[in-house]
Image (tube, coloured by chain):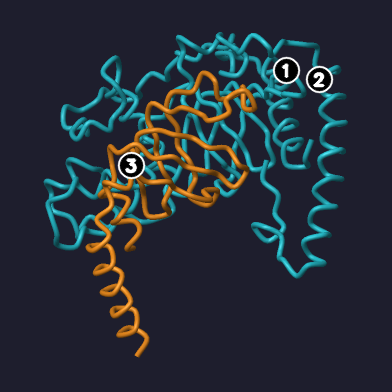
Chain colours: A orange, B cyan
Amino acid sequence: MLFFSFFKTLTNQTVTIELKNDIRIRGILKSVDQYLNIKLDDIEVLELAKYPHLSSVKNMFIRGSVVRYVMLPRSEVDVGLLEDATRREAANQAGKAR
Amino acid sequence: MTAFTSILHRAEKSRIERAPSTSKPRPLPNTLLPFNPHRRFLPIVPPSPSLPTALGFSPPPPNPKPQNARHRRNMERLSLESPAPAQRTPQQNQQFPQNALGPAGPQPTGGPPQLPPQMFTTAAQLLDLTDKKLVLILRDGRKLIGVLRSWDQFANLVFQDTVERIYAGQLYADVPRGIFIVRGENVLLLGEVDLDREDDIPPEVTRAPFEEVFALKKKEEAKRKKGDKKRYDELQALGFEPEHSGEILF
């Protein structure tokens, strides 16, 4: 749930997504859902020559299960806040386990 | 061709073959009409003015309401869940019909004000791709181009007027396939085709007869499989588990 909330705070930022089949796509993060499926707008495929089938695609829906990395803009990530949230989440989980 | 696709293929073929034998003249099945990505289903009921157009994630202006109306009807028919209207205020129900958008995401916890949680559901993401021409890439590397007609919260999809595009080397070929029902787990990504740019295929890629492309593809595939196997064996000898537990994505 933490990552879902985190990605929600990154909407309308430009991110680069690397898929498990090595395609890298840069675009504006439009939406994310509970499975971390991602919707990208105004996409640009890096090494487009290798993936000609994506040449006429303008926005896409990526299934969360095939994402390897999401590269985020450094300036948009509040590391302190994220650390806090992570600790809180971990404490919650520990509380639930007990 | 997998067993599953051949079943679909046969089902569709038999439907087409049966069609003319009925005594009453029937409208042509949709798949027999010439391909037209802009074709839309007519709404069965006139759209009510209270349909969800708020929040800007409904389809763009030209004809948004009939699509929504139709889709909502479909999803009501397909839904596995029984509606639970009691948990929602009437106002919420009006804005977001239960079945059209599936279960709403979790409520944001505290913090700064956020966009409504309904925006962050699989359903909301797929709703504005409905009835559009899309490229669907499957986990096995197939590229299907067709019109998305229906879906559910797992990204199980129904595609109409599907064409499979096969790429090999610098060649490509199109194979007409018809209707596809795709189980969500096999979906890699869904891309909306920009209709203004769809014919701008990169100049170095040329169209070729299917047989030629298919033969080339088979050769490429065999070569790649060999290479993959070698790599995995070497990794395993070093104690590495192959990436994504040996499942190969294309």
Return the residue at label 3.
A31
Which residue lies at the image location 12% right of the left edge and 51% below the top edge?
A: B113
Asked if labels 3 and 2 share a chain, the reply is no
Residue situated in front as seen by the camera: B217 or B118: B217
Give residue B115's position: percent from left, percent from top.
Answer: 19, 45
Please determine whether, in this image, residue B84 is positioned above or below residue B154: below
Looking at the image, do the residues carrying marks 3 and 1 touch, with CB atoms under 8 Å apart?
A: no
| Label 2 vs 1, first from the N-terminus | 1
Give residue B117's position: percent from left, percent from top.
Answer: 24, 50
Residue B213: which disc? 2
Residue situated in front as seen by the camera: B113 or B242: B242
The N terminus of chain B lies in which quarter of the figure?
A: top right
- Is B249 displayed left or right of B81 in the figure? right
Return the residue at label 1.
B172
Please determine whether, in this image, residue A15 is positioned above or below residue B117: above
Which residue lies at the image location 62% right of the left edge and 43% below the top edge?
A: A21
Give residue B225's position: percent from left, percent from top.
Answer: 83, 44
